[in-house]
């Protein structure tokens, strides 16, 4: 097969590359290869079984059209200050303009018009004052909350739109290799079981998301694609009663707090806050179970959950940050017999594990019913655990009750952003015809910034074609 553009991965970066290229008048064929399923076929059996059955060959929560976005809580961060380091590559002003443009597309396909977190009330000023006293920074970021159930419908509309305008989508096939000759990428090799095919293309776009970060790292190493070890985030998913977070939920919806707690001073931050939300489990290809969280527009719980992530940057000679984080996750999974671990914060401070009976007697009841009560400190690195504990104690000064004995910590929460691919402002790698986008590239974090990178790629391709 020969095509103009082949895109590996049907997450936001790949989707918006195709969408923008088509709308900018790109005339050649566009093919998207996705190892998962079309959105309408993505169903998680846990809704019926009430526990993860470890679907094969891929987890439907994280793999398929729109990637993890289809089943996420669907929060779009509308500030260039949130979502990765793309502003360092293309500039803050251009990034913000692209965010505004991408936001318009999301609205076109059905996103809620309401924007959260834009209050400038005295309540927000008081929250900021307490954050400063606690040594934390409160990041201002308007948020458009789509909601888990609305995300599914929105991305389904985009899928149908792309099909209607002639974008070909190949589902159930996996990219096994790049086709390189004379220093130029000329397409990809794909496989499905024992079958194999080649797709030749003028442009090859790798947009495999967090799930594909490890694969892309090996590809970069194998073909001398310029890259450097990036950051991995190791952390926990915290769950508290809505009453504890009520003020901050109403004023900000999401409390984007950042700190550098002593003694290690690693960057620690709050990410993906879900008022009235539910803790969830995701499974990676190597049977690694990780925790996440989401929130619906209509269905609500009694709890708020959020991630606390500790960023780790490694120096020479170590160059395998993704493998390091995976080992942490594997050890945690081992302690939970393949399940997510949950522990009360008070038990951590007391140096004891949590027992199921204690959870059943607590005010905070887990929204992930198959999480296993245990001891997450037996698996998380000392540096990460110390940072997380001290950060929680600091947040308690901003949100009284956050560090209560009954606050729940789920583990492992891992974000793989590693292997930052070196590119210029036009998103060109050192291999002609090859571009790497989204979270797997190491430049973005989250739905909005990955979408923005795709839009930029679509524009660059059509500009080059018109010259």
Image (cartoon, rainbow, N blue to C red):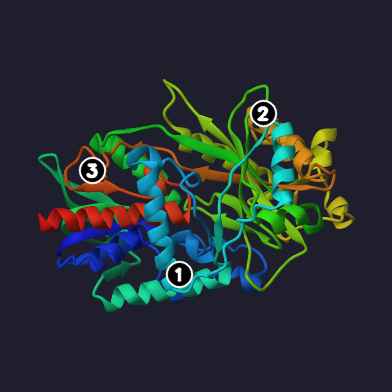
Residue at 80% over, 52% down: 244
User: Are the two marked residues, 2 and 3, in contact with CB atoms closer than 8 angstroms?
Assistant: no
**Quarter residue 380 falls in:** top right
Residue at 27% over, 34% down: 226
Q: Residues within 10 Å of mark 2 (few under 14, many from 20)?
A: many
- For the C terminus, the image quarter is bottom left
Alpha carbon distance from label 1 to label 2 = 38 Å
In the image, which disc is placed on residue 30? none
Badge 3 is on which residue? 428
Which of 336/433 is in front?
A: 433
Residue 238, x across and y down, in percent = 70, 48
Q: Is residue 117 visible?
A: yes
Query: 153 above or below 275?
Result: below
Residue at 45% over, 22% down: 315
- Eye-nearest disc, 3 or 1: 1
Query: 410 above or below 263?
Result: below
Q: Image check: 120 left or right of 106?
A: right
Label count reads 3
Secondary structure of the residue carrying numbered label 3: loop
Alpha carbon distance from label 3 to label 1 = 30 Å
Q: Closer to the N terminus: mark 2 or mark 3?
A: 2
- Eye-nearest disc, 1 or 2: 1
Badge 1 is on which residue? 107
Badge 2 is on which residue? 261
Q: Residues within 10 Å of mark 1 (few under 14, many from 20)?
A: some
Q: Image check: 298 left or right of 4?
A: right
Secondary structure of the residue carrying numbered label 2: loop
Secondary structure of the residue carrying numbered label 1: helix
**Quarter residue 294 falls in:** bottom right
Residue 1, x across and y down, in percent = 15, 64
């Amino acid at each position: 097969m020969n095509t103009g553009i082949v895109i590996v991965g049907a997450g936001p970066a790949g989707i918006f590359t195709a969408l923008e290229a088509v709308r900018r008048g790109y005339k050649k064929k566009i093919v998207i290869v996705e190892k998962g399923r079309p959105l309408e076929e993505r169903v998680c059996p846990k809704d019926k079984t009430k526990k993860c059955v470890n679907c094969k060959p891929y987890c439907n929560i994280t793999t398929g059209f729109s990637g993890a976005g289809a089943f996420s809580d669907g929060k779009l961060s509308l500030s260039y200050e949130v979502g990765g380091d793309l502003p360092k590559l293309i500039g803050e002003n251009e990034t913000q303009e692209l965010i505004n443009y991408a936001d318009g597309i999301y609205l076109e396909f059905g996103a809620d018009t309401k924007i959260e977190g834009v209050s400038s009330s005295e309540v927000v000023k008081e929250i900021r004052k307490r954050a400063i006293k606690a040594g934390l920074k409160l990041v201002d970021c308007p948020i458009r909350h789509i909601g888990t159930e609305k995300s599914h419908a929105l991305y389904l509309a985009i899928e149908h739109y792309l099909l209607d305008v002639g974008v070909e989508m190949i589902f159930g096939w996996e990219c096994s290799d790049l086709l390189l000759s004379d220093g130029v990428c000329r397409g990809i090799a794909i496989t499905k079981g024992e079958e194999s095919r080649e797709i030749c293309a003028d442009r090859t776009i790798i947009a495999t998301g967090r799930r594909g970060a490890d694969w892309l790292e090996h590809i970069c190493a194998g073909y001398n694609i310029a890259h450097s070890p990036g950051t991995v985030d190791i952390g926990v998913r915290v769950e508290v009663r809505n009453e504890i977070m009520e003020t901050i939920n109403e004023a900000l919806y999401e409390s984007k707090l950042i700190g550098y707690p002593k003694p290690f001073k690693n960057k620690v931050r709050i990410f993906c806050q879900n008022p009235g939300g539910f803790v969830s489990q995701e499974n990676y290809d190597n049977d690694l179970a990780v925790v996440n969280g989401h929130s619906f527009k209509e269905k609500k719980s009694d709890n708020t959950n959020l991630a606390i992530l500790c960023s780790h940057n490694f120096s020479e000679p170590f160059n395998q940050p993704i493998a390091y984080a995976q080992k942490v996750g594997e050890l945690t999974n081992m302690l939970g017999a393949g399940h997510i671990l949950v522990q009360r914060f008070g038990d951590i401070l007391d140096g004891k594990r949590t027992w199921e009976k204690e959870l059943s007697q607590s005010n905070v009841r887990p929204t992930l019913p198959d999480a296993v009560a245990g001891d997450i400190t037996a698996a998380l690195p000392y540096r990460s655990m110390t940072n997380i504990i001290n950060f929680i104690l600091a947040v308690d000064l901003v949100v009284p009750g956050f560090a209560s004995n009954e606050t729940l910590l789920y583990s492992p929460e891992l974000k793989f952003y590693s292997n930052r691919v070196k590119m210029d402002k036009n998103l060109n790698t050192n291999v002609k015809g090859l571009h790497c986008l989204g979270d797997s590239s190491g430049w973005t974090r989250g739905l909005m910034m990955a979408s923005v990178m795709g839009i930029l790629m679509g524009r660059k391709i059509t500009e080059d074609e018109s010259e």
